[in-house]
Amino acid sequence: ARQSQGTASLQSGLPDEHLYAFQQELGGWFPALKWLIKEFRLKVGYETPDEEAGLRFWMDHYEPKTRNSMDLVPIDPDRWHWPTADQPALPATREELQQARRWPLAEAEKQINRLFELKRRICPETPVLVPLQQLRNHNTPHAFSSEHVQAHLREARRANSVGGTRRGQ
């Protein structure tokens, strides 16, 4: 049966038992990783295809080029705030960018892998983000225009026809 809100995603419409499983397994990392994948789509035009692409995106955009001792102090992910994690068309806040820049590489890699492993195990067909086709229907004050959505859909189709991500680079 089709839901009135459209296709479920990890951002919206996920069954309670799946939502609970992600929250239990990932804790404060769950909204952080939804945020990261949303930022990937806003910058690249399609959803992160796998953990390798997600980690590479974080490293390229948020991993600090130099670290001082303060940056290496672990932060409690349950104290993070990700106000745009479930808003598919809103860009990151300054606070979100600062939080993402403090993730230790090893922990970011571990958590991204856990998200994709859990997704494959309990809801492999469910996208992480609200599908692009549904953005104009999503309740967000800064939604993409229909032309913007169509451009992203064309880009996503082109990327899928090329065969996804390139490995080994």
Image: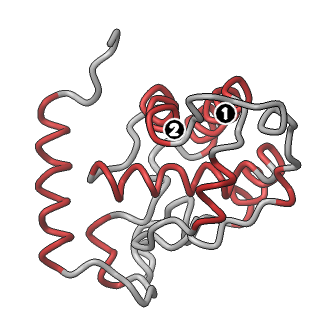
Q: How crowded is mark 2: few (under 14 residues within 10 Å), some or many (20 or more)?
A: many
Q: Is mark 1 on a helix, strand or loop?
A: helix
Identity of the residue drawn at 65% across and 54% down: 98
Camera-nearest residue between 34 and 67: 67
Identity of the residue drawn at 74% across and 30% down: 107
Nearer the N terminus, badge 2 or badge 1? 2
Task: Please state if 113 lies on the left or on the right of 91 as rendered.
Answer: right
* Whether residue 125 is situated above or below residue 52 in the rendered picture: below
Identity of the residue drawn at 79% across and 53% down: 28
Residue 120 sits in which quadrant? top right
Residue of label 1: 108
Residue 72 sits in which quadrant? top right
Q: What element carries label 2?
A: helix
* Whether residue 60 is situated above or below residue 125 in the rendered picture: above
Camera-nearest residue between 109 and 3: 109
Say what amino acid the circle numbered 2 marks.
Trp
Task: Please state if 106 lies on the left or on the right of 93 as rendered.
Answer: right
User: Residues at badges 2 and 1 in contact (C-beta under 8 Å)?
Assistant: yes
Say what amino acid the circle numbered 1 marks.
Ala
Q: What is the distance, in whole Å, between disc 2 and disc 1 at their CAs?
A: 8 Å
Q: How crowded is mark 1: few (under 14 residues within 10 Å), some or many (20 or more)?
A: many
Where residue 143 appears, x then y in whole percent? Answer: 34, 81
Camera-nearest residue between 104 and 120: 104
Where residue 105 appears, x then y in whole percent? Answer: 66, 27
Task: Please state if 93 lies on the left or on the right of 7 as rendered.
Answer: right
Residue of label 2: 58
Q: Quadrant where the C terminus lies?
A: top left
Camera-nearest residue between 70 and 146: 70
Q: Quadrant where the N terminus lies?
A: bottom left
Where residue 136 appears, x then y in whole percent? Answer: 29, 82
